[in-house]
Amino acid sequence: MGSLPRIQAPGSTLAERAALVVVAAIAVLTVALHLIAVAGPTGALWGLHQYAFLPRPMLGFGLAALLVGLAVALRLPAPAARGDPDVPTPLPGRAVMRALIVPAAGGLSFALFWALRIRHRFLGDAMVLVQDIPQPGGVHALEPVAMALQRHLYSATRAWFEQPGRTAGDVAHLTTALGSAIAGVLFVFTAIEISRQLVLSVADRAPPQPVAPARDLRVALGALVLLAQGYVQLFFGYVENYTFLALAIAYYVATALAFLNGRGGLLPVVLASSVATCLHLSAAALAPSLGVLLLIGLATPELRTLVRRDLVPTIVLLGAMGLLLASMGNGYDLMAHLTATIRTIAAGDSWTGPYLFTPAHLRDMANLQLLIGPIGLAALVLLMPGLRRHSANRRVRAFLLALAGTYAVVAVIAGDSNLGYARNWDLLAPAGIPFTVAALFLLLEQIRNPVQLQRALAVAGLVSVFHTASWVALNASLERSLERFKTLPLGGGRTESTVGYWYVCQGRPDLAEPWLHLALRENPSNARARMWLGHACMMSGRPQEAAAQFRLAVDQRPDVPLFRLSLINCLVLARESAAALSQARLLVRAEPTAARGWAVLGTVLLTLGQSTEAHDAFERATLLEPATPLYAELLRLSTDPDGIQPILDRYWTTLTL
């Protein structure tokens, strides 16, 4: 790593030298922190301790590959120059090569995303998602379109993955991974377009200009930086909805840069921001940068024409998307859910206690930015002092700083969650895209020497590959990822309860119970740990102990239907139907429009021989969700004198878990 300072050239400007030092410092710091973290995975460096869980030779191989890559990068030849950067150099077969590159790049990237896809469900809400996606359900309050998209994808492709021994959750995992990989292919081309637009945005201010091959090299190196950051893990079969959000944010950036460069209209920008917000409400953070973009468009004569041309179609588009959202479920209220989301983010405190203004929050923020980087928020902040007062690129600069600045505020105020900061890293991972794009633009703007620019971009890309490739390798192994998850400092017994839940799902109550007891020892109010301990007791043939744990979970969190459903399930299987009936009535009283609750009530009533009231309950479930075949089948079986046993054998687990 001692050769990194060679990227600095004699005669460089102060701003250029500072930018080169920033790249070198981030490269050295990234490698140094990885070496420190590999010595012992204590959890304090959870954003870059992945090599500690991989075979030790992989670290040596990664370092060797990085050093070889740096040796080549630091000897990149100087580009030739010409007067007009937009006039391509005529090369034999250039058009044919471009035509072949697109499908080849698409096929290769999909193969990479799919072959190295994530094999576990420990991060984010993956464990819950794979259970929810196969179930017909309402609109997700925070991600209305993304969740619907996942369900449609499951319906369209599940036949490809269904086979004996695979549960519906296993199939949902694979269909979601497929969607993630497809989104990754689109992200590759979007990143290339972002890099191209960034290079074009600075091409008019640094004579002499590069010929097309040299410009293409800069575009390729810029794309490498964008594609090698930690947030790209979302596209390796990640089981969450933030994959689509990240793609939408990237497309928004690409269309906005094209608009500012006079190479695209306003309509695609508004479309991208609207789609992103519908995918996940956190994309409302795009609004300030969109406002800046509109102000720039109105204040710039050559862009004002584009704004006027697209004004009416934009208004029509926004109205159509509003009607689409309103038609989802029983009427989706975007503004109400958006307001609630903003309040939740601003609250910022963990349910386990004060968190936002603590050293733990600072630790987790730093780890997250390292994980989704390393060329991200830290690089952007360190490059800010090099801003020139006068710049030919101030329109692009203003937009990107507004975009990255908004997400920086979100990153600072976003506190803990019910899952824990480290487990919920994917929530803020898409914010890494604006950070990296803005940092990349500042590098292009501040490093005027073409040789040093190419070398700096190559160093930034290579050290990012060293960081992110190891994450991809770790996530491709379920066993190694589990060992890594056991070290996460989630607090409140959440690490231990999640591990216990995983062992319950694998049918290993003997391994689950010690972890669940550890979770309750750390946090006796962890109701989820109590619920899974109850399931472990049931699997071990101890229904009375199970019922006691389920009752404690319900007492602690009576607002969570899943806990009450687990208690009802246990009571029915223990032939305590009278007690189960009182719990089922509480369930439907709390959620009278939930079809599943009425189906559960109907089943409990059937076990007590109250067939008329049971039939009414099943009929209510069918009326609430007429498109769900399950409830129609339950209604039919309720008229059969022997129908209770098929219901318990075939459908009871689906209703209560």
Image: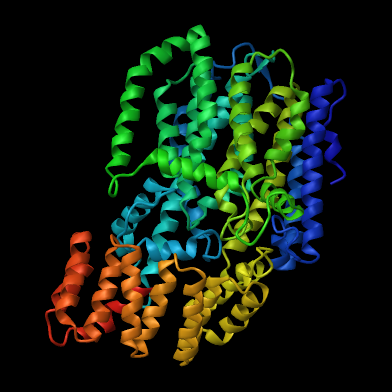
From this view, report whether residue 431 is shown above or below residue 597. Answer: above
The residue furthest top is 301
From this view, report whether residue 566 is shown above or below residue 318. Answer: below
State the image coordinates of residue 433 (x, y, percent, origin top left). Answer: 58, 39
Residue 498, picture quadrant? bottom right
- Is residue 212 or residue 229 the one in the foreground? 229
From this view, report whether residue 210 is shown above or below residue 333. Answer: above
State the image coordinates of residue 152 (x, y, percent, origin top left). Answer: 31, 53
Can residue 377 be seen in the rendering of this structure? Answer: yes
From this view, report whether residue 94 is shown above or below residue 161. Answer: above
Quarter of the image with the C terminus is: bottom left
State the image coordinates of residue 96 (x, y, percent, origin top left). Answer: 44, 31
Residue 264, picture quadrant? top left
Taking the spot 59% from the left edge, 21% from the top edge, the residue there is 396
Taking the spot 58% from the left edge, 56% from the top edge, the residue there is 417
State the image coordinates of residue 75 (x, y, percent, origin top left). Answer: 77, 35
- Position of residue 575 in the picture relative to residue 81 (left or right): left
Colouring convention used in this rendered image of the protein? rainbow
Can residue 625 be seen in the rendering of this structure? Answer: no
